[in-house]
Every structure is written in structure tokens, then in C-alpha cells.
Image: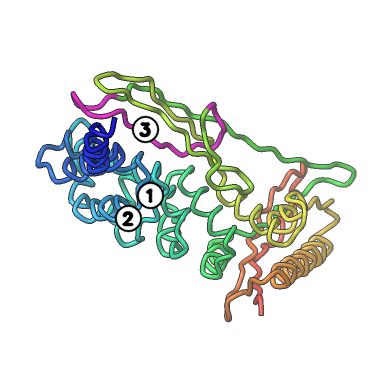
Amino acid sequence: MSGLTPLFLAVGAAWAQQPSISATEKARALQLLTSIAWVDKAWGVYFAGRLHAEELREPLIEEFRSAGALRDAPSYSEQHAFVAALFDAAIEANLTVPVELLEPFEEKWSDPVLILLARSKDNEDGLLRLASEKSRNAEWLAANNLLFAMKSQRWYAGMLADLKVTNQFIVTDPGEGGSGGGNGGVICGDGVAAMPKGFPPITIHTLQERAARGSVLLAPGPQNIYDERTVVPTDGQVGYGSCSTNLDRAAYRIKYLADLAGMPGSQAENVFHRVTGISYHGAEDFAREVGKDLGAQENGIRKVMQLVKERGLICPAGLRLRIVPEVDDRRRDAREPLPVVMPRVMSLQ
């Protein structure tokens, strides 16, 4: 038995010198990342994203630097598929990608960009760009929800500047009343997603306004936004689609203000988008009622702004709001023309 001891020791030493499976996988991922073939590089980011190894995080982030040139690649190309794999890997690895590396992708890859921006502390500039009016509804909501959650002062100032304040005066004959209405809807599109031959299974991340099986809550707010995940298998295809509501962005600005002020949304809606019924008893009485109601609306707006201020957000100096009157004349016998109602400008300071 004593003669076997050196043999056991030699075998043990040789085994100890063998690289672990984890080390082998990490080395393989790094090797694939240096390939000139897009399919190999895609496998490299795929493995790097799923190994969750600290030493693979920086190489993955660096891939975004060179991939910026691929942001406009056609959807059927290997370059486009590689960018999709790169975003999927970064999301899977829970990476925090510098905002400047994500900026080139904001227009064509806004959904995964927003998912990564949600993890960054230095994300305000990127979110403000994606909260602009040119963004599609889900992007707009996600960016605004994230800015709302962080109580961005710049976002608040911009939202107030874009705020549309109205007062609809419904004028009727004495003893009659008026009412209004609204509309909405959902638009959906369906298709098929596939990747070039030999590419790894890639998860496509799409922002949606409704939760679905497997989706992840990304940005809570007056309308939650979810990360819907669709896995495209290797050498296969999968059904793929999205839905979007007919979004009234002006109404959502009021909902943000309501939440910031800690009041019901319907109450804030009545402050900023007021509907006033006036029974017509002559021009002088009409003008007096209009002035009285516009004054009450202005006071209501100031109260909302004060409540928001108490929660940490301040109106920018010199900002003015314009209350735009809308007159709906429903009189059956309107021989006497209604007096012209001019917009009312109010300072918030």
C-alpha cells in the first residue's frame, strides 16, 4: 500500500492543476468575443451574460462601445442579431452600462436601453431624451415613470412647461344641462421573429403597458410598464407582437401631478381640465360666471403646486401657465352672441 501513495499524490496533483468547468467556460466566452464571425461573437456574449462572472462584466460592457456602429443594421442581418444578443446578455447579467455607451442606441433600440437605464444612477439625461414627445407610448410612459419615481426636478419643470390647462364652458339655456365624453382604444400588431442560422437563443425585450405571462414589472407609475420577454430559439422562429393603447399624454401629465400632490386623479383632472356648465342669463352674467370660475381654477392649480412643493419639487422661476377656455354653445336660441373669452395667464411663483 505504501507504494501506491506516490501514485495517489501524483494523480491528486494533476487533478488540482486541471482548470475548473467555470474557468473553462469563462475562457471560452472570452475567446468567442474576439472572433470576427458575428455568430461566434453572439455566442460569446450569450455565455458571458449567463455565467454572471465578475471578470466578464467589463468585456461585455466594452462590446457596447464598438457595437454603436451597428445600431442601424437591417433587422435580418447578423449584425442586428448580435446587438440583440448583446442587450439580452447585459440584461441577463444585470449589468449597469454607462449612459454614454447606450446613447447611440436610444432611437432604434429604446426598449432594452430603457431597461438598462432603469438600473443606472446616472440616467437622468438619457431618460429625459426618451421622455420626449417623439417617443412611442410605451417608451414615453416608461421614461416618465422612472423620472417620476426619482423626482427629477428637470423632468418636473419640463412637464409643467408642456402642461395643457383648459376650461370647457358648456353654455345652455336656463334649466338645461350639458355633458361631455371620451374615447380610447387598443392597437395590436403581430408577426414572427427569427435569428440568422446558428445564433444562440436570444430574448427580445419589448416594453408593454399590460402584464403578460413571463413579463417583468419595469417602471411602476400611473400606468405600469412591463418588460415582456420573447425567446427566439436557435434556428427557429416564434410569434411576436405588441399592443399599444390610444394614450392621452396630457391626461397622464395630470396623473403624475396628482400622485406628486397626493390627491385623487379625478380631483386633479378637474383642476387642470375643468368642465363648467353655465346657464345663460345674458352677456354680463356670463362674463361674471366665467371670471369667477377661472379664478377658482387658478386657486386650485396653486394648491396643487403647493402640495407638490411640500413633497420636494419646486416650480422653476418665471414659469407661467396658460388656461385656455373652450366655449361650447348649446343654446337652442342663440340670437345673442356670446362674449369672447380670452386665455388666462397665471404665474406660479
Quadrant placement of the C terminus? bottom right
Callout 3: few (<14), some (14-19), or many (20+) C-alpha neighbours within 10 Å?
some
Separation of residues labelled 2 and 3 (CA atoms) = 18 Å
Task: Give the residue displayed 84% in from the left and 51% down from the top.
Answer: 279
Where residue 343 appears, x then y in whole percent? 63, 66
What is the secondary structure assignment of the residue under circle 2? Answer: helix
> Separation of disc 2 and disc 1 at Cα?
6 Å
Q: Nearer the viewer, residue 38 or 305?
A: 38
Q: Which residue is mark 2?
A: 102
Tell me how many marks there are. Answer: 3
Side (left or right) of 326 relative to 245: right
The reply to whether callout 2 and callout 1 are in contact (CB within 8 Å) is yes
Can you say whether 348 is above or below 160 in the image?
below
Q: Which mark is residue 113?
A: 1
CB atoms at circles 3 and 1 under 8 Å apart? no
Residue 262 vs residue 275, the one in the foreground: 262
Of the image marks 2 and 3, the number of the one nearer the N terminus: 2
Residues drawn in magenta: 194-213
Q: Dot 1: few (<14), some (14–19), or many (≥20) neighbours within 10 Å? A: many
Task: Indicate whether residue 209 is drawn in magenta.
Answer: yes
Q: Say which residue appears at 18% left-offset and 44% top-offset.
A: 33
Amino acid on which disc 3 is placed: Thr
For numbered disc 3, what is the local secondary structure? Answer: strand
Circle on res. 203: 3
